[in-house]
Amino acid sequence: MSVTAIDLANIQAAKVIDARASACPGPLLEAKKGIGAVKVGEVLEIWSGSPQTRTNIPKWCQKVGHEYLGHLTAEGGYDRLFIKRMK
């Protein structure tokens, strides 16, 4: 396991959004709504079953100024994506 994966596995998210049942762009839309629920410096975790989310979330973070911390694949086969609110 890489150092990044260990760090991500130990992150305590301020809010977790379960968007596993949503097709793309659903998880991205949920992230956009959910980021306002966490304070600057806190982490939002998105659960997604859509592979496109791994591309869409980092692009969105770069565009709007949040920090994309990375993703993990959970045992259930879905992705756990981590976003740090920067503004």
Image (tube, grey):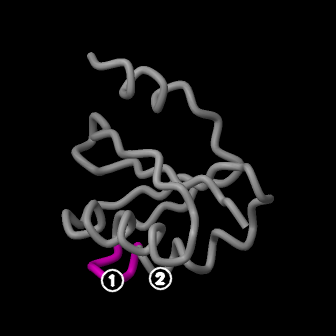
Quarter the C terminus occupies: bottom right
Is 5 colored magenta in this rendering?
no
Assess disc 2: are there few (<14), some (14-19) or many (≥20) residues with their C-alpha within 10 Å of its C-alpha.
few
Name the spot of residue 79 as percent of width and height, x first. Answer: 31, 50
Residue 19 left/right relative to 76? right
Marking on residue 29: 2
For image coordinates 65% across by 69% down, the residue present is 35
Q: Secondary structure at mark 1?
A: loop
Q: Quadrant of residue 22?
A: bottom left
* Picture quadrant of residue 74: top left
Q: Main secondary structure of the magenta part?
A: loop
- Distance between mark 2 and mark 1 Cα atoms: 6 Å
Residue at image position (21%, 69%) is 52
Q: Secondary structure at mark 2?
A: helix
Foreground residue among 84 and 19: 84
Q: Position of residue 4 (x, y in %)?
A: 38, 27
The span picked out in magenta is 22-27
Q: Which residue type does callout 1 highlight?
A: Pro
Q: Which mark is residue 25?
A: 1
Residue 40 x %, y %: 77, 58
Residue drawn at the location 27% of the way across and 78% of the way down: 23
Tag 2 and tag 1, C-beta contact below 8 Å: yes
